[in-house]
């Protein structure tokens, strides 16, 4: 009987030890004090006045740089330049969409190429939350390959962004032991101490997706960080070349109509149901209603492939381009492009062909803009109003009037100028 009791006791002890070793038992606490106030941003926020953001008490900003294997956030450079100029600590994150390790390596290289030459203050973040039916084991392999590839290419430390569910049941103990955590938890972060995950500590908490911060129109993600989120002495990231062709993403809002489904909308815009669910925080993919606004990221294959002369823009045709795509990207009509290029067949354009988009002196003061309808230009470092006017073949006075500019000698980085 005594032997049987001993065997039973030993069995219980062994079972408990196995349970402890295979379960998420760690309470989640901040890696240190004090806590730094932060936000994370993307093209969703549009133009941000970082001087007002800084004045509101924000210390850290994580900026979306890229998504997938070739989508660069269109506001990445502007966000980086303006946040840095206002003395904020800056970090970058990539929205990972890989479904195998090969894609993970490719996206790591793309991410590293987009942020080349920049000087981050914070660890480089992986945002991996849409898995597309990939198994948990493969998810962990993909995450590890991506993170290790980014470390190798950039010589910088990395961090995992995750919601609570994935931190508990998707990302495994091995990842938790090797990479720090930035967790999404919308509540009092002290409550995390009573919640078990595969991590013992966190270095960041995304505490809300409904934050209101001066200088930002609409809602923004609010975050808190510990000092461990910061890299050592900031240094410029090495140059990384990428063989893929970068595509800027733009945001459109689709109003749901009777009979619509997410799959129909996704097919229409060349995206996936999973992505629509993710960026719209949709809890039930089968439940959308007429009148609902669905945010869609669309990719333009024509952005950035232009040359600008004195008062003119010339676009070089790429494989797969159509006149309607090009016209839409530049907010002109197909007829306008056909007319100024003397095209005989609007359906026949070929890669390498150069198409004029605007002509010199196409508009004059006090004339309505006929060829360019609602065209906008985002001011970059070093721009002047006279340079912009020269590019588009209009006068400074015209731009001043169109944009209600009080002082034509003062424009700022990221300002949107209507042409």
Image (cartoon, helix red, strand yellow):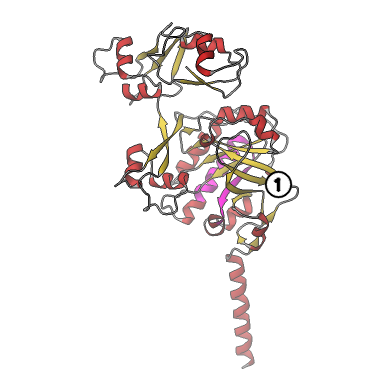
Magenta residues, as a range?
141-164
Side of 269 relative to 72 (left or right): left
Residue 74 shown left or right of residue 6 in the figure = left
> Residue 369: image x %, image y %?
41, 14
Identify the image quadrant of residue 407.
top right
Is residue 205 rendered magenta in the image? no
Q: Nearest the camera: 134 or 224?
A: 224
Horizontal arrangement in the rendering, residue 48 relative to residue 69 (left or right): right
Q: Residue furthest bottom?
A: 1
Q: Position of residue 409 (x, y in %)?
A: 62, 12
Q: Residue at x 61, y 66 (%)?
A: 21
Q: Is residue 112 visible?
A: yes
Between residue 408 and residue 16, name the one nearer to us. 408
Residue 203 placement, left or right of 394:
right
- The reply to whether residue 318 is in sight is no
Residue occupying image coordinates x 68% and y 29%: 86
Which secondary structure class fits the magenta region best?
A: helix
> Callout 1: few (<14), some (14-19), or many (20+) C-alpha neighbours within 10 Å?
some
Which residue occupies the foreground of this view, 266 or 17? 266
The residue at the point 37 percent across, 49 percent down is 289
| 216 vs 336, nearest the viewer | 216
Please state the total of marks drawn on the protein image: 1
The quarter of the image holding the N terminus is: bottom right
Q: Position of residue 189 (x, y in %)?
A: 66, 54
Question: Which residue is the site of mark 1?
Answer: 226
Percent coordinates x, y for residue 137 in the rendering: 48, 56
Q: Secondary structure at mark 1?
A: loop
């Amino acid at each position: 009987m005594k032997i049987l009791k001993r065997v039973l006791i030993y069995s219980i002890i062994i079972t408990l030890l196995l349970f402890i070793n295979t379960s998420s038992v760690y309470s989640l606490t901040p890696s240190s004090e004090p806590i730094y106030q932060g936000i994370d941003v993307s093209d969703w926020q549009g133009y941000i006045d970082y001087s007002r953001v800084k004045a509101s008490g924000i210390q850290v900003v994580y900026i979306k740089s890229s998504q997938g294997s070739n989508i660069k956030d269109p506001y990445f450079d502007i966000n980086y330049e303006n946040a840095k100029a206002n003395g904020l600590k800056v970090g970058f994150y990539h929205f990972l969409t890989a479904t195998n390790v090969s894609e993970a390596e490719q996206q790591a290289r793309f991410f590293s190429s987009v942020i080349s030459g920049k000087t981050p203050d914070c660890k480089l973040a992986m945002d991996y939350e849409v898995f597309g039916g990939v198994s948990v084991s493969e998810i962990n392999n993909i995450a590890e390959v991506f993170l290790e590839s980014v470390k190798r290419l950039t010589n910088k430390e990395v961090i995992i962004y995750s919601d609570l569910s994935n931190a508990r049941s998707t990302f495994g103990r091995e990842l938790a032991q090797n990479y720090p955590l930035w967790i999404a938890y919308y509540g009092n972060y002290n409550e995390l101490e009573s919640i078990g995950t595969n991590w013992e500590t966190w270095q960041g908490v995304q505490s809300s997706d409904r934050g209101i911060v001066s200088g930002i129109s609409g809602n923004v993600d609010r975050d808190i960080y510990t000092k461990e989120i910061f890299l050592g002495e900031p240094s410029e990231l090495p140059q990384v070349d990428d063989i893929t062709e970068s595509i800027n993403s733009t945001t459109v809002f689709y109003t749901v109509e009777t009979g619509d489904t997410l799959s129909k909308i996704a097919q229409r815009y060349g995206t996936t149901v999973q992505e629509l669910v993710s960026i719209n925080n949709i809890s039930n993919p089968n439940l959308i209603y007429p009148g609902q606004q669905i945010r869609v990221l669309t990719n333009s294959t024509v952005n950035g492939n232009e040359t600008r002369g004195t008062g003119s823009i010339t676009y070089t045709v790429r494989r797969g381009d159509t006149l309607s795509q090009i016209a839409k990207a530049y907010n002109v009509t197909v007829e306008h492009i056909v007319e100024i290029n003397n095209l005989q067949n609007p359906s026949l354009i070929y890669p390498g062909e150069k198409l004029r988009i605007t002509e010199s002196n196409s508009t004059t003061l006090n004339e309505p803009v006929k060829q360019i309808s609602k065209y906008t230009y985002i001011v970059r470092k070093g721009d002047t109003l006279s340079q912009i006017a020269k590019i588009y073949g209009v006068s400074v006075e015209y731009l001043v009037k169109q944009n209600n500019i009080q002082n034509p000698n003062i424009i700022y980085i990221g300002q949107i100028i209507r042409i």
